[in-house]
Amino acid sequence: MTALPTSLSGKDWAIRTSGLRKSFGKTVALRGIDLTVPEGATYVLVGPNGAGKTTALNIILDLVRADGGQVEALGLDSRRDGPALRAQIGYVPEAQKWECNWMRVATLLAYHGQYFSSWDDEYAARLVKRLEVPLDRRYGKLSKGQARRVQVVLALAHRPPLLVLDEPTDGLDPLARETTLSVLAEHMAEYPTTLLISTHLVHETERLADHMGVLNAGGLRTQVPVSDLQEMLRRYHAQVPEGWSGAGVLDGSVVRRSRNGREIQWTVWGDESMVRASLTESGAAVQDVRALSLEEAAISLLSDEETSHVEA
Amino acid sequence: MDEVRRGRVVGALQPGDLLPSVRQLAADLGVNPNTVKQAYRELEREGVVQMRRGQGTFASDMAVNGAERKRMLREVANRALVDAQRHGAAPEELIDSIREAARSADTEAAG
């Protein structure tokens, strides 16, 4: 049977990391990840808090040094060409507070714009209006949601070829979230951009994503095109006979299993007709097969395969 | 996609009508522009729309075909059937009650 893929096929990468490792003291944040973001993709990196998402993004931007491994982004070695690379990246950091807290937002925009030759004042003004950013307030006095919107303007207004967004919808109310997604979608339609978005709330970015990587406990469980995920990942609901001996069938392809008496519910990666056939052959009577939303898929992929919801 | 097809069938979209641009629709729905492009391309393959380079996407002037209308009605029927089954009603009962509902809707409209 086919196992869950952990690498993407292709050759034009906006970002490619190999064997990225990082520990903070005794805590292992990343245990050798090979993350690849195709050029032009919208890659959503999913994982629970503490999975290593922010660490991975920070290493890509060369804001944090890795213990081992390499990052190539936009054809540059992030460690050697950090500044040149960051000049081509629009970045929304996870943390809101920084050294510009005392600036009024208008000043902050002007100041930030100085760093980028491609900064577009007119576009920045349009974004400010769309996102209802208060220009005359001090940045440090903004609410979490307002600060996040300022960050989005800062990231987009120089029209970088690569956007790295760390929890971009965090702290936004539903309306602001819709507006932000709309702004991003319009930006993508207008300028060729690669996006790397980290989130622990998949459903918020589901409509933008075309690739998904699942990071858990410092390891990349999978990275796949969303279209493959929709085609290959299914939840199978089946009845099994008393003393069923087929528990080992499809080993390596079962992403998550749960059992309740004679009913099993398995989430399996593979061609549907083949999975059905294998289950039937093992004596299970398949009753229902359904595709999963991106969020359901992410949750399945993040849960521990064997121990999840096993009820005797 | 279904919205555009429906619009075409019920006549809300006339041949030659300009559809929203990819950018506009992506922004309105907050979805990946490539998804919108794909949907338009698929509709073009089905002959529902026509993409003209640099001008936009238009409702195609192909006559609304009966097959498409039939397909849509079939979908409505299937949904109703599934729903009725869930409530333990037989197809015959459903058909009767649809007729009844249509009659009372007519009377109401007349009155």
Image (cartoon, helix red, strand yellow):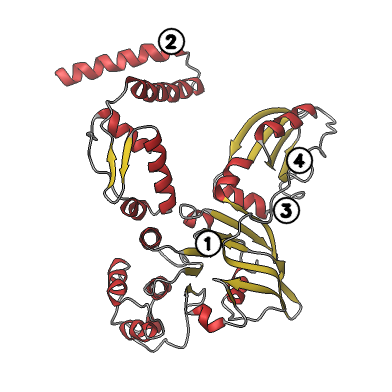
Q: Residue at x 60, y 78 (%)?
A: A78
Q: Chain of mark 4?
A: A
Confirm whether residue A50 shows in the render: no
Q: Which residue is mark 3?
A: A304
Which one is earlier in the sequence, the residue at label 3 or at label 4?
4
Of the 4 image quadrants, the one containing the C terminus of chain A is: top right
Mark 2 or mark 1, whichever is nearer to me: 1
Task: Mark 3 vs mark 2: tell me if same chain.
Answer: no
Give me the C-alpha separation between circle 2 and circle 4.
45 Å
Give the amino acid type for the residue marked by disc 3 in the picture: Asp
Left or right: A66 as drawn, with respect to A190: right
Q: As drawn, is B101 to the left or to the right of A162?
A: left
Q: Which mark is residue A39?
A: 1
**What residue is shown with label 4?**
A1
SS assignment at label 4? loop
Label 2 to label 1, Cα distance in Å?
56 Å
- In the image, residue B26 above or below residue A133: above
- Kindly report the distance in space between the C-alpha atoms of the residues bearing marks 1 and 4: 30 Å
- Asked if badges 1 and 4 are on one and the same chain, I answer yes
Q: CA distance from mark 3 to mark 2?
A: 48 Å
Residue type highlighted by circle 1? Glu
**Residue A101 to residue A199: above or below:** below
Mark 1 residue element = loop
Q: Residues within 10 Å of mark 1 (few under 14, many from 20)?
A: many
Say which quarter of the image contains residue B18. top left
- Label 4 CA crowd tier, 10 Å (few <14, some 14–19, many 20+): some
Q: Which residue is mark 2?
A: B92
**Figure quadrant of residue A127:** bottom left
Percent across and percent down for residue B38 are: 43, 45
Q: Nearer the viewer, mark 1 or mark 3?
A: 1
Dot 2: what SS? helix
